[in-house]
Amino acid sequence: MDFSAIYTIARQELVINIRNKWTVIFAVVFGILVVSISYFGIMVEGFSGMQSFTRTSASLLNLVLYIVPLVALIMGTLAFTGDKGSTELLFSQPVSRHEVLLGKLFGVFFSIVLSTLLGFALAGAIIVAGNGPEGLTSYVFFVALSLALALVFLTLSLLVSTASRRKSKAFGVTLFLWFFFVLLYDLLALGGTLLMKGQSANAFLFVSIFGNPVDMVRVATLIILDNITIFGAAGAAMLRFLGGQTTSIVLLITGLLAWVVVPLFLSARMMRRQDI
Amino acid sequence: MINVEHLTKRFGRFTAARDISFTVKEGEVFAFLGPNGSGKTTTMKSIVGLNVPSSGRVLVNGLDVLRYPKETRQFISYLPQRVVFPENLTAREVIHFYCKLRRLPPERGDEVLDKARFNGFSDKFIGEFSGGMVQRLGLAVISLPDTSILLLDEPTANLDPQGVKRFREFVLNQKENGKTIVFSTHLLAEAEQLADRAGIFVNGRLVAEETIENLRQTHRAQNTIEDVYLHYVGANQDE
C-alpha cells in the first residue's frame, strides 16, 4: 500500500470539496444551527444565555442524527461517482484501485470533519466563555461520535456508488438509505417487538440498536451524557443488557467500527474486478 | 511491447470486443480506426487495465496487465476519450497532483505547462477553460512522465484546427523520441499522416491489421485510405 499516493489523492479531494459551494453552505448553516441551538435552547425555559456542554450536546443530538448522515451520503455519492473522464485518467496512473478508494474516502471525510468542526468549535468556544469548561469531555466525545456517524454513512455511500456505478441511481439508493436508517428503522424495530413477548421483545429491541448506526450513536451519546436514565426502566435494562456503561460504550464503538469496515471491505472487493 | 491476445470483452449480453489479437512493437505508432461502438475504446481501456477482459489477456513489456496493474501502468500514459478535470482546481494544481502520483518534482509540471503554452492560464480555474484547453491540459498530463507507451483515445475530438495541428506535432515529436504510440481516431487522414500501422475495428472485431501502405496496396481499387476504411466497414456490416 502506497501511503504517499493515498495522501496525495486525499489532499486533492479535500481541496476539491472545500472549494465546493455546497460544502461551504453546509458548514455555515450547520455552524449557525449549532450556535443557535446552544444559545436559544435554554430560553424556552425562561433563562437567557448559553447552555452547558451537556445540555447543548443533548439538544444537538437530533440535529446531528438527521443532518450528518444526509450530508455524508450526498458528499460521498458526489465524490465517488465522479466524471468518467476524470476517473479514467486517475485510475490509469500507477496507483492501485484500493489506494484511489482510500484516498478519496479520507479526502471527503476530512472535508466533512472541517465543515462540522467549524460549528462545533464555535459553539464550544462560546460555551466555555459563558459557562466554563464543565462537561467539555462529554462534548468532545459527542463530537467524535458525530464524526464517526459521518464516516459510517460515507462508507455506505462508497458501497452504493461502487455497486450502482451511475450517479442518478446511486443518489436514489443513498436517499432511501437515509430515509430507512433515520426514519423507518425504529418504526420497524418497534413493530417487530409487537410480534414478540416479554424478554425476547426487549432483547430484540436492544440487539436491533446494532443494526442501525444512527441508533448506536444516539444511545452512545445518551450514555456519555449520563442521560440514559431519561428512558427510565428501559434505559436501566438496556445498560444491564449491554453490560454496564463502559462495556456499552465499547460495544457501541466496536459496532460503529464494523459499520465502517464492512462496507469498505465490500467496496474494495467489488472494485477489484470492476470496469472503470 | 504491447501484446493483445484473444481479447474478448462482454458487457452483459453485448460483446464489445471479440477475440482481438495484435502486437505493437517498440517505437511504433499504431492507429485504431473504426466507427463508433466498434471496440476501439474497449480495447484501449483493456490495455491500460481499466477494463477487465472476459477472456484473453494483454501483456505490456511482457507483464500481464491484470496481474501487475501498477507495474504495467508505470510504462503507460493514457488520455481518455473525453478527459475531464475538477472545475475548481487550477491547471497548475492538476499538473502538480499528477506529478506527485508519478513521483516527479513539481518543477517538471511547471516545465510541461510552459511547453504546452499555458502561460497566463496555469493559475486559472479549469471551469474557465474551453474544451480545447481541457484537452491540451490532458495532453500536458500525459507528457509529464517519460513513459515508453502513449495511449490516446480520440485525442483530437475536442480540438480546434490549431489544436489538431499541435497534437500532430506532439505525436511526431514523441515518435522521434522513440515512444510507442497507440491512438484511436475517426480522422483517417490523421492515421495516414501519423501512424506506421493501423488496425481496423468493425463490430467489435479487428478486421485488418496492416501498414498504411499495405492497406493501400491490398486494395488498389480504392483511391484513398477513406475508401479502404469504408470498404472494410461495408464488408463487415454486410455479414
Image (cartoon, rainbow, N blue to C red):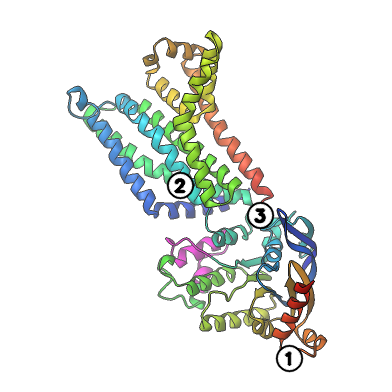
Identified at 70% across, 81% down, the residue is B195
In the rendered image, residue B179 lying in the magenta stretch gets the answer no
Which quadrant of the view contains residue B235?
bottom right
Which quadrant of the view contains residue A71?
top left
SS category of the residue bearing label 3: loop
Residue B103: percent from left, percent from top? 58, 61
Identified at 54% across, 64% down, the residue is B105
Amino acid found under the numbered disc labelled 2: Met
* Alpha-carbon span between mark 1 and mark 3: 40 Å
A74 to A251, vertically: above or below: below
Report whether residue B169 is seen: yes
Mark 3 lies on residue: A275
Could you tell whether A186 is left or right of A136 in the image? right
Name the mark on residue A75. Answer: 2
Could you tell whether B146 is left or right of A241 in the image? right
Q: Quadrant of the C terminus of chain A?
A: bottom right
Count of numbered circles on the image: 3
Name the mark on residue B53. Answer: none
Mark 1 lies on residue: B223
Identified at 44% across, 37% down, the residue is A69
Give the foreground label among 2 and 1. 1
SS category of the residue bearing label 2: helix
A20 to A245, vertically: above or below: below
Mark 3 or mark 2: whose residue is earlier in sequence? 2
Q: Which residues are magenta?
A: B84-111
SS category of the residue bearing label 1: loop
Residue at the extreme front of the image, as rendered:
B238
